[in-house]
Image (cartoon, rainbow, N blue to C red):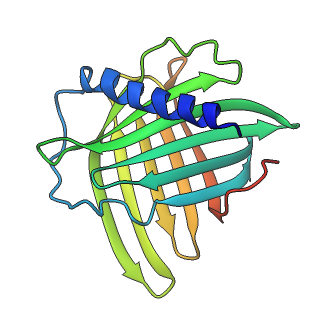
């Protein structure tokens, strides 16, 4: 990827953070955690899903994590989204999600902010596991996003919410991977 492409991606993620700060939901769970909030989530994840081949990357920083997700099928990118998990000054964590179409047609739409409802982490014989749940009751689908890292480096992403008046739930199982050429 060209250097200018990475610069554009970084600028988009930063813009999402600025826009979402002004839209943060009023009710948020206060979590007493430290800068090592989600060490078990960091890294590259991938897997074949019902939507196509999904890849997700999480890069940690002192008080935030930057994430990217894309789904590819038939050699084409179908969806991509940029995510930011950040800690506010009150030790409250938000996840800001900026989905886009493959053609970037809807990039002008505002990002969606989800508040951290709960988070847990533990060390096991197979490594570190954990769960984090983000919610936004005003959003339709998803209004709840759950990340669970299971033993053997498996990441379960669960999206829940209401779509077209019906409750819906979708799960994706990814495994730890390396950055590489997309499928």
* The furthest residue to the front: 3
Q: Position of residue 125 (x, y in %)?
A: 47, 88
Picture layout, residue 38 above or below residue 90:
below
Q: Position of residue 134 (x, y in %)?
A: 35, 42
Q: Position of residue 117 (x, y in %)?
A: 27, 46
* The furthest residue to the right: 74
Figure disc tally: 0
* The furthest residue to the left: 90
Q: Position of residue 113 (x, y in %)?
A: 34, 29
Q: Is residue 142 left or right of 103 when viewed as pictured?
A: left
Q: Would residue 155 be seen by someone viewing this image from the given angle? A: yes
Q: Would residue 142 be seen by someone viewing this image from the given angle? A: no
Task: Place residue 68 in its image quadrant.
Answer: top right
Tell me the residue at 86%/37% (across/down): 75
Picture layout, residue 82 above or below residue 156:
above
Q: Is residue 84 left or right of 100 when viewed as pictured?
A: left
Tell me the residue at 78%/48% (across/down): 182
Quadrant for the N terminus in the image: top right
Which residue occupies the foreground of this view, 149 or 104?
104
Task: Place residue 74 in its image quadrant.
Answer: top right
Q: Is residue 55 left or right of 86 when viewed as pictured?
A: right
Q: Is residue 21 left or right of 41 when viewed as pictured?
A: left
Tell me the residue at 17%/53% (across/down): 31
Picture layout, residue 2 above or below residue 35:
above
Which residue occupies the foreground of this view, 42 or 169?
42
Tell me the residue at 69%/46% (across/down): 54
């Amino acid at each position: 990827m060209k250097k200018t492409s990475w610069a554009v991606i970084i600028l988009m993620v930063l813009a999402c953070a600025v826009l979402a700060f002004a839209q943060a939901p009023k009710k948020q769970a206060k979590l007493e955690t430290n800068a090592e909030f989600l060490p078990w989530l960091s890294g590259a994840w991938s897997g074949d899903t019902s939507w196509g081949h999904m890849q997700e990357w999480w890069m940690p920083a002192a008080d935030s994590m930057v994430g990217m997700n894309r789904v590819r099928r038939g050699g084409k990118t179908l969806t991509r989204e940029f995510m930011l998990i950040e800690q506010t000054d009150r030790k409250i964590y938000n996840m800001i999600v900026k989905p886009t179409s493959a053609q970037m047609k809807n990039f002008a739409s505002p990002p969606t902010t989800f508040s951290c409802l709960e988070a847990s982490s533990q060390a096991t014989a197979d490594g570190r596991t954990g769960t984090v749940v983000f919610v936004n009751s005003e959003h339709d689908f998803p209004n709840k996003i759950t990340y669970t890292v299971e033993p053997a480096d498996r990441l379960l992403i669960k999206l829940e919410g209401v779509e077209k008046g019906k409750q819906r739930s979708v799960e994706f199982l990814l495994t730890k991977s390396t950055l590489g050429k997309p499928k």
